[in-house]
Amino acid sequence: MSANDILDVLNVQRDSLDLPAKKKQKVLNDVAAVHRQTGLSRELYSLLGPNTPPANLSNATSSGTKSKFNLKPSPWTRQSFTAQSGDQKGAEFFHWVKGSKELIEQEPEKPYIFEKFNVRLDIPELPDEATFDTYMSELLQDEEDARVKEEERKKVAEESTKSNSTEPKTETATGEKTDTQNEEKTETGTKEEKRSTHENKRSAPDELKNVEQSIPPRHNWTYEETVHLFELCNAFELKWPIIFDRFKYPGLREEDLKDQFYRVSAKIYQSQPNASHALIESLKSFSRVKEIERKQYLEKLLKRTPAEIAEEESLVIEARRFELAAKKMLVERSQLLTLLDSPQVTQSTQQYQSSQGLANLYNNLMIIDKHQKKRQLQQQLRLASSSEPLPPPIPSAASSSYKRDRTFQTQLQQYLSNVLRQSQSVNGREPNAIQQLLMKRLTVKEEEAYGLHYHANERLTPGVMLRSTQRLAGTQQRQSVLRSVNTLLQELDIPTGGGTTWRPVMPTRKTMAKYDELIRSVVVLLDVKRARDKLESEIKLIKSQRGIE
Amino acid sequence: MSGSAVHGGDEINAIVLDPGSYYTRIGYAGDDFPKITTPSFFAIGPDPPKKGKRTRIFGEAIGVPRSNYEVKPIIKDSLIVDWDAAIEQYKYYFEDVLKINYKEQPILIVEPVWATTEYRQKVVEEFFANFDFPALYLAKSPTCISFQQGRANCLVVDIGHDSVSITPVIDGMSLLRNTTKTHYAGAFLNAQIQDMLNKKYPNLDLCAKYLVRDRTPTKYPEEAKYTQRQLPDNITDSFYEYQQLALWHEIKETMLEVPEKKLASDRETYKDETHKRSFELPLGQLIELGIERFELADSLFDPKSYPLRDQDKFPPTNGEVSIKTMYDDYRPVKRTKRTESSQSSPPPEEEEAVTIRGLSQLVAHTLTSVDIDLRASMAHNIIISGGTSLITQLTERIQADLSNTNPGLKVRLHAVGSSAERSSQSWIGGSVLSSLGTFHQMWVTKEEYQQAGAEKILNQRFR
């Protein structure tokens, strides 16, 4: 006995319910169908009915969890290791490693896993004292040469500035001012202040001189000091703040240490045959004076007062605002330009000067517009499939006026083409044939033929409108009235355009007007009929009340 | 090892020892909290110590009143002063409490920055001589704190019991020359509290809790109602003082609050009724403290304005430490002073004549002594640590003061939220450090120490 049998006995119909359920089951239990249920007897299984759980109860998953529980715990072994390898053997420590003891013992001994992080910098080795001394004397010589050169350069520069300063009067005045201050040897800070306000050409070299004066001369390095320095550089991997911190000889700056290290390293590399030229150059590019100067400037920057900082910040904000405004203006301008940028006329406009051509143009524009809309939609929704396929363009021959006024239009076309040909041949004398045509007073027949109509006192919405979508004035009625109008029209066998809008099958202006008239009269008729019915029933009521009849 | 790929750790269960001036912390590396937090004090009886037998008492047992037992500190200023007691204490905890097998793991000892070479040498030698650890490492406490916070570059402000120290840490290494240290810390506050109470309530018996069996609360001018406990004779003064520490601690924890600005500038706002709090003394008397609460806390920031009666205990200090014997008075040349144009700038703090520096001044001073390239990152990573830093509003005050004195820097303070973590931050950092896989290459064995020589090991291996 199956569930179906029971349901049959109970007079329950479930065929309609069953069908989709079965379908679903088929999809869900595709795999289950292969793995037939074995634990239950067939009858019992079918008794489960349509309430079978949607989840797939295959054996695979249950066995999976079971095997997980039954797994043996993975063995871990406490193993000894030494962190350092090579010449310096470190102490033996113990840590836990995954894997059984036997397995780990089999493995070949590897270097400690974190050993690879212990990187050493490639720092040149300091030579013996004799070579060091020669290096130092060479360096001194180089320095002397550089200084002589620098002084020469300065002299030249000074002369040039002197000649410069004679030119404008105001500049000489300020120049003299600074000169006198130089002699007075006042505080450098005030001088710098003044100079920064004046901003003359002399300020840069002058300031340099001042800073140099405040920087103590190079320290005379001994061999021991340098050895200590190199040792520290090795130990602390060129972390200069720390090297400076741990350097045991007093009276030096961090820059002094850097300077000594870099120039000695450069010397050492120069003496080696296969050293890279770029490295030596980069080592030589360190300038102790420049570095000290830089730090002094930074220090000054930090010593700004809150007022100065606030001023600077406000300036930055203002600058940002200007930037934003400029960006906005640019965007606006580009938008304006795109608006002004109308499509250029590339073909002759002649083909659009007939009504057929206009219809063609209209259709094409519609298609382009729809395409654009479609594209926009697609961009918005990013669902290419969801957008509807385009309706096929209406063939121009199907337009009503074409067929009916063919003869007239051909005449008109001939006339127009004639006129245009004329105007082309005598270019300049009669500029626009169409304008002339329009200016000519048309007869009623002609107006009708062109489809011209003057909307005297009708309200029109701007833009192009199709008559087929136009709402008739007469249809502005209540829904119930419209329904009865509809039934009347059906009785009279008058065809409608169908759908929700009320319109004739062929909505020309004339038919539309007639149609409107018809609907209005039908509505009036219906009103009259309703009034009559009402009166009749009232009369009947009164008659029955008065006992007549 | 499976986890090592993720966080670079490799557990070898090293022992981490952090001897602080108030508490000593011992535990296993990789733990998030020390197994043992014990006072850095010991109690010793009148009998001469016998060979091979423990005569000193450690831990909470110190608090039991015994006749003729003196309570003495093991550590002063984070440095071990009583070596015999220290070794015995560590032995007691290693062997009797933790029951460790020395051979199995190395030990990391947290040391202060101002430890001298001789002291450090003594530490290494004593540990190798007395314990069987295969290797050891001396880690500077600011380094540990920077590891606890996971900030390689930071300025560590450690406000402990005996000392306030400020150390810049670069790439996880402490800069010794820039370290400053004063003693305007927890113990200084204790003295301040004692002075204040003596001055305000001259006739008040402060007592200590161990003397009282039971009490009924009274309000101060009334007599205290309590019954005394039966105690053995000859309780020493040192025991009494040690017991009183608990009272000072309670006042510090519950009463003190740091004023927003230097208190001298607006005392009136703090005299308000709303700022009053009452406190129950051990004898059951309630006293009310108002502006005193702020004055006490303010003394950390402005010690000059709060002179102590006992001047000798805390001589004036401007916080400059000479750490090495080779160290001289060289200081980086400061920017040339601007005399006329700097009227609007904040008043210059760093005068040669400065003899006393409060907490904020000290931080600001340390900050200016750091190399200019590092200063911005230092100011942005200031770590506030140590038990005394838990006083209400302390970090806010430092923040405000620093922002005022350094308008060009972006000052950001980091303080651990949990109070327990903040006071044992350096131990936790040591635990982090010594459970890193890459760190295991840094341990120094006895052989290496003997081969390479003390100086090289101390200055280049122990960074």
Image (cartoon, grey):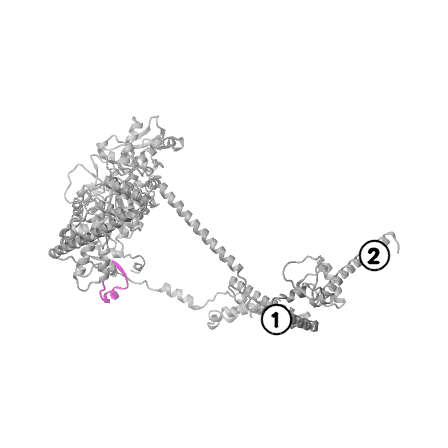
Task: Mark 1: give few (<14), some (14-19) or many (20+) Cα within 10 Å.
Answer: few
Q: Is residue B79 left or right of residue B287?
A: left
In the image, B48 versus A518, the foreground residue is A518
Magenta stretch: give its range: A95-111
* Membership of B300 in magenta stretch: no
Q: Is residue A391 left or right of residue B2?
A: right
Question: Are labels 1 and 2 assigned to the same chain?
Answer: yes
Give the chain of mark 2. Answer: A
Q: CA distance from mark 1 to mark 2?
A: 79 Å
Residue A67 higher or lower than B218, as above or below: below
* Membership of A108 in magenta stretch: yes
Amino acid carrying mark 1 in the image? Ser
> Which dot, 1 or 2, sits closer to the camera?
1
Residue furthest to the right? A548
Residue A427 higher or lower than B380, as above or below: below
Residue B407 appears at what percent x and percent y?
Answer: 34, 42
Query: Can residue B362 be seen by looking at this rendering?
Result: yes
* Mark drawn on residue A425: 1
Q: The C terminus of chain A lies in which quarter of the figure?
A: bottom right
First of labels 1, 2 by sequence position: 1
Residue B320 appears at what percent x and percent y?
Answer: 23, 40
Q: Residue at x 81, y 57 (%)?
A: A532
Q: Residue at x 47, y 55 (%)?
A: A330
Residue position for label 2 = A536
The image quarter containing residue A83 is bottom left
Label count reads 2
In the image, B43 versus A496, the foreground residue is A496
Residue A153 appears at what percent x and percent y?
Answer: 23, 52
Residue A93 higher or lower than B346, as above or below: below
The image quarter containing residue A349 is bottom right
Residue B300 appears at what percent x and percent y?
Answer: 29, 36
Q: Secondary structure at mark 1?
A: helix
